[in-house]
Image (tube, rainbow, N blue to C red):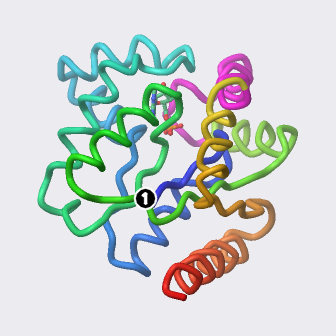
Amino acid sequence: MLIIGPPGSGKGTQAERISGCLGVVAISTGDIFRDNVRRRTPLGVEAGKYMDNGDFVPDSVTNSMVRDRLQQQDAREGFLLDGYPRTAGQVDELDGILAGEGQELALVLQLTADDEELVRRLLGRAKDSDRSDDNEKVIQHRLDLYHGQTEAIVARYAERGILAKVDGTGDIDEVTDRVMGAIETAMAASVN
Ligand code: AMP
């Protein structure tokens, strides 16, 4: 499964909850990059150059990291990817990885919220976060990239009939209920 949404839509929080409910591993590319930045690994040094400005880390770097991660044992029986893919090239890469493993995407969840709400949430989060990319200028750039590139790839999953859009506004528990409802509906439809 994939969870896709604009910055501030709560995809990390919901991914953790889905992971807890379904017992599948949640893999966040943003978390992996941040962990590498903190540990000052070569990957972190490279990724950090882009993250601070809210740019996408280049596909060549991101794709090989995801390919390695999905080969680990805990992802063999399924996984939930949070924050990947975000570009057309990443969709192609993921298709290739899955085809190579004989796996198929079951469901793509898209969390939605309007930009005004997202900016409000992210600026709120900035007060007690150590994220270098939660400031007004960078937030706007991250939103622009989402609208410019990531929404287009969501449309590709819609064409394949595996997209479920979930309203990401309101109380966190309410959003989780909607998310779990969307997963149940999709799973029931795939069994029938
Ligand atoms: P996130 O925690 O998902 O908001 O990601 C934080 C930052 O990590 C993004 O703004 C990008 O710089 C980088 N990043 C995370 N996932 C990707 C991806 N799939 N492709 C490129 N860059 C990414």
Say which quarter of the image contains residue 96: top left
Front one among 129 and 138: 138
> What is the tally of numbered marks visible in this picture?
1
Q: Residue at x 23, y 38 (%)?
A: 67
Residue 170 placement (x, y as % from top left): 80, 66
Q: Quadrant of the C terminus?
A: bottom right
Q: Mark 1 and ligand 1: say if the CB distance to the nearest ligand atom is below 8 Å.
A: no
Residue at 14% across / 53% down in the picture? Answer: 72
Percent position of residue 183, x then y? 57, 76
Pick the front one: 174 or 67: 67
Q: Main secondary structure of the magenta part?
A: helix
Image position of 138 with respect to 127: above or below = above
Range of the magenta residues? 128-147
The secondary element bearing badge 1 is classed as loop
Name the residue beneath numbered marker 1: 105
Depth check, front residue: 148 or 37: 148
Q: Give x and y (percent) for residue 124.
A: 72, 43
Q: At 18% across and 23% down in the image, what residue appears?
A: 41
Q: Position of residue 157 (x, y in %)?
A: 59, 49
Name the residue type under label 1. Answer: Leu
Residue 77 sits in which quadrant? bottom left
Residue drawn at (79%, 60%), measured in percent from left and top?
A: 169
- Relative to residue 26, is residue 161 drawn left or right? right
- Image quarter where the N terminus lies is bottom left
Q: On screen, 61 above or below 33?
A: above
